[in-house]
Amino acid sequence: VAKAKAPDKWVRSTCGYCGVGCGMYIGVKNGEAVYSKGDPLHPVNMGTLCPKGLSEHQMVRADNRVATPLLRRDGELQPASWNEVFTHTSNTFKRIQEQHGKGAVAVVSTGQLLTEEFYALGKFVQLGLGTNNYDGNTTLCMASAVMGYKQSFGSDGPVGCYEDFEKADVIMLIGANIADNHPILKLHIAKNKKTRGRKPTIIVIDPRKSKTSQMADIFVPLKPRSDLALINGLCYIIMEQGWEDEKFIRERTNGYKAFRKHIMANYPPQEVANITGIDVKELYNLARIYANADAAMSAWTMGVNQSSIGTDTVSAICNLALITGNLGREGAAPMSITGQCNAMGTREFGFTSSIPGYRNYASESDRREFANIIGVPEELIPTKRGYAYPQIIDAINRGEIKALWVVATNPLVSYPDQNGLREALKKLDLLVVQDAFMSDTAQIADVVFAAATWSEKEGCYTNSERRCNYAKKAIEPLGESKADFYIVKEFSTYFEGKHDLLFKELHTPRDAFEEIQRVSKGRLCDYSGMSYELMEELGGIQWPCNEKAPKGTKRLYGEDMPCPTPDGKAQLLPVEWVPLSEMSCRELPLILNTGRTVEQFHTRTKTGTIGILDNLAPEAWVDLNPKDAARLKVKSGDRIALSGNRGRVENVIVKVSATVREGNIFVPFHFNEQLINNITIPEFDPKSFEPNYKQCAVQLHSEAVP
Ligand code: SF4
């Protein structure tokens, strides 16, 4: 660091972008964040950061920060006091709830708050506002993993850890472009050969030849959304050949008989070859390599989750691991990689799909136990989960939900079928956005709560390997913005009796953390043995952490740890592949796949103002196979339009590239100027409610070149 810019102090913290959870130092000079660097002692990243982490300090004082609360007056958002925005919002919420019922107010949050903030927000929404129509944008990315883990193991919770990438014989990446989306994980794969003395076999399964495929020993370019059939086909071959782990199946699983019958009746290799486009010989090769590994790890992200059969695809991956005994040992895990920095925190303690501590709304004993621990009447705890995110949007469209409070997410870029969404949002009486950045959604809000961001507040994030990392406050919040914890706590004082009931003892995030510890004690996601100080000392701690495991737990469901099911066994589930609902046709001959690029994060509210990142990826592009490009008479650098059954996107630059199969295209979703979610399909997994972002039919218009 040049001397003139040298920070006055370095504050140890955690990256606030993705679910890898890298340890870092924030350089502070004159009360401002001026530098970001990796923490060399942190076990996740060992000193390295990706481009987003390295430039993270630059987003803290970006031009699009919201420095004061805003209230729409005379059609324009204008600065207002906290009292004005809280009074206006609370009065409107109360009026709507009196007229239309508690559920007429809904809340959509995020995976980017700190766990203490999720806890405070969920507690206020569910027990204070009394609406259970509360969900997170995590339903757009992780919900299928949550439901798949619940189906297979009895609870949510990633079962493995990053060290498993270092210890596995076989690493199967399926629908996971880690080179772009979780780049630091490559360090753990790179350590594998050094750790074991021999190279692992890396299998990359993806319809698109992403950057991650470059590290593959075997690349499997299957047809779009045929992954579930592929995995079922591998299970068929493994059972046909007698390669399964009979002892593990007998002692650690239920349901083998029905599972085997289903697979052997429906997924013979030739059938699977027809569905996937992968020939029979290669299917046998893959099955042999996976089944005969001493330890096989499978890892997946959005390619699997963001599908209308995402939940069952997750369970198919778990089935494959279970029949081969790849669970609870070094290098052996079916591992979901999370998207946002604290998608896990909201899953554990956010009051969305479960009561904090992975408790069930439907369970009377879970509700009673939770109410007793936090000292509230049991009747306050909802007896069922309310609407999930897509159901909230549908209910707005029907006129059932009248007010929406959006926290740290930007549906006006990220939600599928934007035209449908815009029509729904117009029907609201009140749209409140709580965000640190003036997002597309904040711009159409009636009220904006100005939130502090990363480095301006303290608390913890849980990463993809259940590692709870401490993020320390380094600087004061910008202007009048406040940490989300304090926004919620103060807002609760505008609702009679709610603050004293819910937050009287919670003065700071640390108090919330201690309540979380009490709530989690004895549960799978046990934080009772943790502290901020221990997290700092160890570089995060993996739950469960308690008296028995004072330094945390690397892996779930080893021999000494039963699954949280009635008999402690995992479930082998017969799951069914379902073809795409929207196939390509004469009018719409291409299948659109959407995804991300390493330089940008989500809807660019944070990364879009960082020059170095935005210069590297300033706009969307479309990857087009050379044969399609020749047929359509376009070349790299041309600007085209795309359209589908729901909308259109203009002015997208062409990259002719064999990375996509013929008949398939890829467009990144980050960019509001070329809003690809105008076209994506509002089709959702019926179990997780996760959208099917990865496949819909489109056509290309080369005449749209300006
Ligand atoms: Fe941050 Fe993720 Fe990059 Fe690590 S890999 S520096 S957590 S964005």
Image (tube, rainbow, N blue to C red):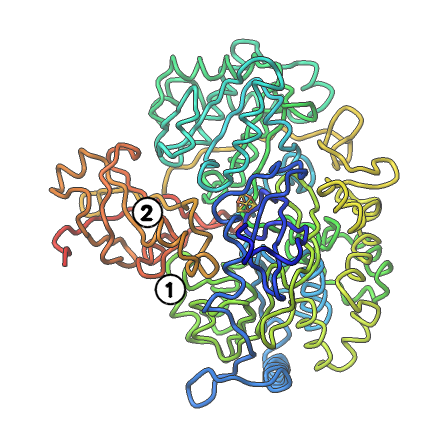
Residue 211 lies in quadrant: top left
- Identity of the residue furthest to the top in this view: 241
User: Which residue is the site of mark 1?
Assistant: 420
Residue 554 lies in quadrant: top right
Specify whether residue 104 is in view.
no
Q: Which mark is residue 667?
A: 2
Q: Looking at the picture, does residue 505 appear above or below residue 89?
A: above
Q: Nearer the viewer, residue 19 or 32?
A: 32
> Looking at the image, which residue is at 47% across and 46% down?
51
Q: Looking at the picture, does residue 260 appear above or below residue 481?
A: above
Task: Sort mark 1 into few (<14), some (14-19) or many (20+) by Cα contacts within 10 Å.
Answer: some
Task: Sort mark 2 into few (<14), some (14-19) or many (20+) by Cα contacts within 10 Å.
Answer: many
Q: Nearer the viewer, residue 622 or 352?
A: 622
Judged by depth in the image, the label closer to the viewer, 2 or 1, is: 2
Query: On the picture, is 134 further left or further right than 660?
Result: right
> Looking at the image, which residue is at 83% across and 47% down?
528
Ligand 1's image quarter is: top right
**Residue type pointed to by label 1:** Gly
Distance in Å between CA atoms under marks 2 and 1: 20 Å
Q: Looking at the picture, does residue 60 appear above or below residue 80?
A: above
Specify whether residue 286 is in view.
yes
Query: On the picture, is 107 further left or further right than 610?
Result: right
> Looking at the image, which residue is at 57% across and 17% down?
169
**Residue type pointed to by label 2:** Val
Q: Which of marks 1 and 2 precedes in the sequence?
A: 1
Q: Nearer the viewer, residue 312 or 513?
A: 513
Residue 697: image x %, image y %?
28, 46
Ligand 1 within 8 A of label 2's CB?
Answer: no
Quadrant where the C terminus sits is bottom left
Which SS class for mark 1? helix
